[in-house]
Image (cartoon, rainbow, N blue to C red):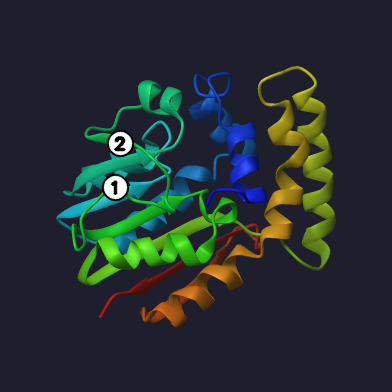
Amino acid sequence: MHAHEGYASARRFFTSGTAPSYDSVSLFATLGRDRTWKRKIVEIAGKRGIVLDLACGTGILSSMVAANGASVTGLDMTFEYLAWGHTNPICQGTAEVLPFRDGTFDAVVSSYLAKYVDSRLAVGECWRVLQPRGVAVFHDFACPTGAMRGIWNAYFAVLQLAGVFSKSWRPVFAELDYVICKSRWVENISGTMRERGFKNINVSYHTLGTAAITWGYKQ
């Protein structure tokens, strides 16, 4: 079920070697925009009672959602990230096969997951575990176009140079731009949400088109 390129990339990127420095690298690599994007996710999710954070990693987004009054469960496939994190309760697993009962959550949120998953499996599982009127929110990097694409390419060239000094992050900095631009996750996720039955589907772009958030509601 997981034999696809996105899953293989995630396995290479998120390891015991990258877990300890993830929080600081996420700020460095996004020039500080990571927390801004996550605040927008929290705003979209709104005041929800029970929330699932997919690919929660070290729990940055989970903590922000919890501070908004929700009870948050974090799920991630990499044990070392969960061990370094600050989310409770937590569960090891994948977004494509969720170990939760139907209708468990009022919202499902995710950050930096969408480019790695099979959209049909992940969106289908979100639909299954959501309560009626629940919301699913996906955030990730987006591949920019026009003049911004040249800046994007130059920035990733800098990141690749930075990877020379960090063995654990080298594969990420070397391959991430390819993974992002090949995934077409915005179209895949929003289209699959529509097919699955989500309503009021929205897509918003941020930071000159280098990040996107798409969300929809289970009616």
- Work out whether 112 lies above or below 210: above
The amino acid beneath tag 1 is Pro
Mark 2 or mark 1, which is nearer to you? 1
- Percent coordinates x, y for residue 3 in the rendering: 61, 48
Q: Is residue 164 left or right of residue 140?
A: right
Question: Observer-nearest residue: 217 or 152?
Answer: 217
Say which residue appears at 18% left-offset and 49% top-offset: 70
Q: Is residue 144 visible?
A: yes
| Disc 2 residue crowd, few under 14, some 14–19, many 20+, Cα 10 Å | some
Q: Is residue 38 left or right of residue 212?
A: left
Residue contact at pointers 2 and 1, CB within 8 angstroms:
yes
Question: Observer-nearest residue: 33 or 80?
Answer: 80
Picture quadrant where residue 217 is located: bottom left
- Percent coordinates x, y for residue 108 in the rendering: 32, 57
Q: Secondary structure at mark 1?
A: loop
Q: Which label belongs to residue 169?
A: none
Q: Is residue 115 left or right of residue 48?
A: right
The amino acid beneath tag 2 is Cys
Q: In the rendered structure, which disc, 2 or 1, sits on the residue that comes first in sequence?
A: 2
Say which residue appears at 51% left-offset and 50% top-offset: 113
- Percent coordinates x, y for residue 194 in the rendering: 45, 81
Q: CA distance from mark 2 to mark 1?
A: 9 Å
Question: Observer-nearest residue: 120 or 46?
Answer: 120
> Which residue, given by chain and number where applicable, does mark 1 sit on?
99
Q: Secondary structure at mark 2?
A: strand
Q: Which label belongs to residue 91?
A: 2
Picture quadrant where residue 134 is located: bottom left
Question: Observer-nearest residue: 67 or 79?
Answer: 79
Say which residue appears at 78% left-offset and 43% top-offset: 155
- Percent coordinates x, y for residue 168 in the rendering: 66, 21
- Work out whether 143 lies above or below 38: below
Say which residue appears at 67% left-offset and 59% top-offset: 183
